[in-house]
Image (cartoon, helix red, strand yellow):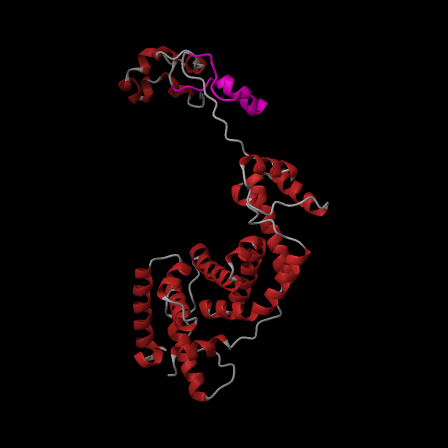
Amino acid sequence: MTGLHDALDDIAAEITPIDPPVELAMRLGRKRHRRRIAAITGTAGAMALSAAAVFGIPALTGPASTPTHTLGAARGAGIPLARPVLLESPPGSATEYGDASLVNTATLRLFQRLACTPVPSDLGGAVTNDAWKAAVGYTAAQWNAPEARSSPATHPASSTSSARP
Amino acid sequence: VAALLEGEEVEMGAESDDEFRDFMRGRWSAMVRLAYTLTGDQGHAEDIAPAAFSSAYSAGGRVRRAGDPDAYVRAIVIHENSKRFRKQRIREDLRAAVPECGTGTDDRLADRAVLRDALNRLGPRQRAVIVLRFWLDMSEAATAQALDCSVGTVKSQTSRALATLRKYADITEGELR
């Protein structure tokens, strides 16, 4: 047996590689690139970035120096950004914390409809929409009685299992 | 979004395309041969190599900043090979006989057939360790980094792989280098 290195050399030399599929690799690379952008920013972002490249709008090629720079550069290239916005409304308070103007209309409508708080009204919370309890016949006595929930036969909601809050 | 905005994925233009074409033409054979030694199958090797180059193309800026595009693509080839085994659970074929091809003396052909058979008995990670350590002459630390495992794992995998090679290919200590 020759040395392992030489033997592996011989094995590697057994094949004659085909011509390099350069254009295929580049096409796959562009596709992968677009998919990554789409995964991060949505399809519109990928289309906008492609369009920016076609029309000669400078692409984003360097690290942003400041958040403002980042935001400006992204807007210039038509990339929608995910905006982290903290928006909450504590129990019993009508005040919203956070900048509601940064939340899009549909999300804000959903937030206000759900009145997001984990505390139910019968335990001190003031803003939860408890209409689902009435819809399934759920009462406060059952809410505080775990044993009442242990038997499906006695559970008023068991007959309407498809009804969810 | 941060990675995207840092320009890692978006440096594509006529100049970088030409650069990539030259690079791929120059390094294609080496990467296919590396993939072949890792997989033992030319078809798989020719699947893995374009995937590795396309990954490198889509990460053009990052490859350029890494400073060693060859090492970068080699790492992708190794990773693509590991991924192939992880995802598809492909096992190497154990063949009773191997076709003889290439040139060389009868002894070398016989040696190669024996070694190939022994390599086919190794798991993908053990095989990768052998190829990286003894063919590419990578250090234990570099091998560990390339395979995304600890140096201890590289040592243990190397030890087990060599035991298998010694058993089936009759390799002595002096023949390891």
Q: Is residue A115 magenta?
A: yes
Residue A22 in magenta?
Answer: no
Residue B96 visible somewhere in the drawing: no
Q: How many marks?
A: 0
Q: Is residue A138 left or right of residue B70?
A: left
Say which residue appears at 59% left-offset and 69% top-offset: B26
Instruction: Tell whether A74 sits left or right of B42.
Output: right
Of all residues shown, which one is farthest toward the front?
A65
Q: Find residue A80 and report its horizontal and vertical position in percent.
A: 60, 35
Q: Using the rendered image of the protein, determine whether residue B31 is visible from the camera's viewpoint.
A: yes
- Give the residues in magenta: A93-118
Please give left or right for residue A165 compared with residue A35 in the image.
left
Nearer-the-camera pick, A23 or B14: B14
**Coordinates of residue B115 in the picture (x, y in percent):** 39, 77
Look at the picture and state if B104 lies above or below A30: below
Please give the name of the residue rendered at 50% of the width and 30% of the height, measured from the top-left corner. Answer: A84
The C terminus of chain A, quarter of image: top left
Q: Residue at 58%, 56% (x, y): give it.
A: B57
Q: Residue furthest right?
A: A55
Q: Residue A103: give x, y in percent of width and height.
A: 55, 24
Quadrant (top left/top right/bottom left/bottom right) for the N terminus of chain A: bottom left
Q: Nearer the viewer, residue B112 or B147?
A: B147
Q: Residue at x 44, y 59 (%)?
A: B82
